[in-house]
Image (tube, coloured by chain):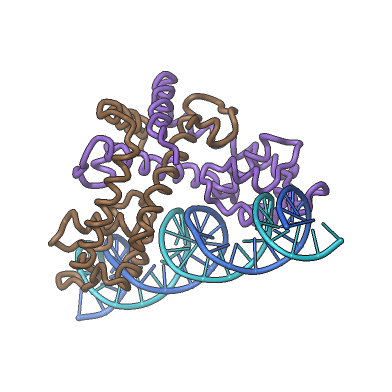
Chain colours: A purple, B brown, C blue, D cyan
Amino acid sequence: MKLENALLTNKFSSEAQKATLNILYTAWWLKSITSKELKDFDLTHEQYNVLRILKGKYPNELCVKDIARRMIEKSSNVPRIIDRLEIKKLVKRTVSESDKRETLITITKSGLSILESSTSKLNKVHASIQTITQKEAEQLNYLLEKLRATEV
Amino acid sequence: MKLENALLTNKFSSEAQKATLNILYTAWWLKSITSKELKDFDLTHEQYNVLRILKGKYPNELCVKDIARRMIEKSSNVPRIIDRLEIKKLVKRTVSESDKRETLITITKSGLSILESSTSKLNKVHASIQTITQKEAEQLNYLLEKLRATEV
DNA sequence: AATCAATAGGTGTATATACATATAAAATAA
DNA sequence: TTATTTTATATGTATATACACCTATTGATT
């Protein structure tokens, strides 16, 4: 869908400004599709993100700040997200022996299992709505990274 | 910055999946820059979005659902965002005469004024971090809209 | 006209963001 | 060693998202 129709306006001050809004809208669009699927697994987008990060290092543990560094949204409140995951027994907290300030997080068997089935469902959904070629995806990645060149 | 460095991983299952994460991360990056500037005006990203929408139709009023339809994030809780703006006297609520279910929202002089100064500040910041050409912005818009072709 | 369904907006709840602050532990300086 | 600073995490608060539900009003159906 054209951005004009998604936002019911065609008042864009420039192509670059339109691109900004287009990125924000597309991010919302992607998130809403993902969240809808994750609901069946009683997971939020962010809880899923944390589980994926933990699986990436499994069977190693990760401390809270190392998870935070890998989050898509850097201002995520990781301890609180871990709270919810811990209640559902999808992760486990232990205090680090070497540095007692650190909390080490491990994904549980149950966490791995729910991550596997939810990822499989998400992959199917993403494949079914896939419209861009690999070359286009590469170009998109190039443009987004160029856009962020002035990292703050 | 490369996505690999932003997320401290290089485990992407495909260019398309990487593009998805790249869009989400770029959206967060853009929002955080904008929000930081808007803080000086005691505005959130979403409050600013509502003010812009209202200005687009000024001096006409807009009802809540027409604002909601124009929001970037469609699941925004518009009545609540208007609550905060109303407290700050940046917008005004009136009940529609023709349909008493509808609440009509108008931006106030004060709202227009704060919108003008904040927009001017944002434009400056955006110009200072601008790294892509108009042609690249067009291409980005094309790719994002192609990505969303399967609108749900 | 009376009833029922649809619509608009408001409100409630769980979770998240964004950011400030608190607390405990570790690292550094005096 | 003691005091100070830094670091890691947790917690508090305001606002937002996501979604369910409530109420008033309108429109449609009988």
- Is any part of residue B66 visible from this angle? no
**Residue B75 in the image: above or below residue D2:** above
Q: Position of residue A120 (x, y in %)?
A: 59, 34
C8 with respect to B46 (left or right): left
Image quarter where the C terminus of chain A lies is top left
Residue drawn at 21 percent across, 42 percent down: A12
Residue drawn at 24 percent across, 55 percent down: B53
Residue drawn at 47 percent across, 27 percent down: B16
A97 with respect to A121 (left or right): right
- Farthest residue to the top: give it: A135
A26 with respect to A46 (left or right): left
Q: Position of residue B127 (x, y in %)?
A: 29, 40
Q: Position of residue A6 (x, y in %)?
A: 28, 44
Q: Nearer the viewer, residue C15 or A103?
A: A103
Q: Quadrant of residue C23?
A: bottom right
- Farthest residue to the left: give it: B59
Q: Quadrant of residue A132?
A: top left
**Residue B106 in the image: above or below residue A75:** below
Image quarter where the N terminus of chain A lies is top left
Q: Nearer the viewer, residue A101 or B50?
A: A101
Q: What count of labels does the image hold?
A: 0
- Is any part of residue A117 visible from this angle? yes
Q: Position of residue C2 (x, y in %)?
A: 26, 79
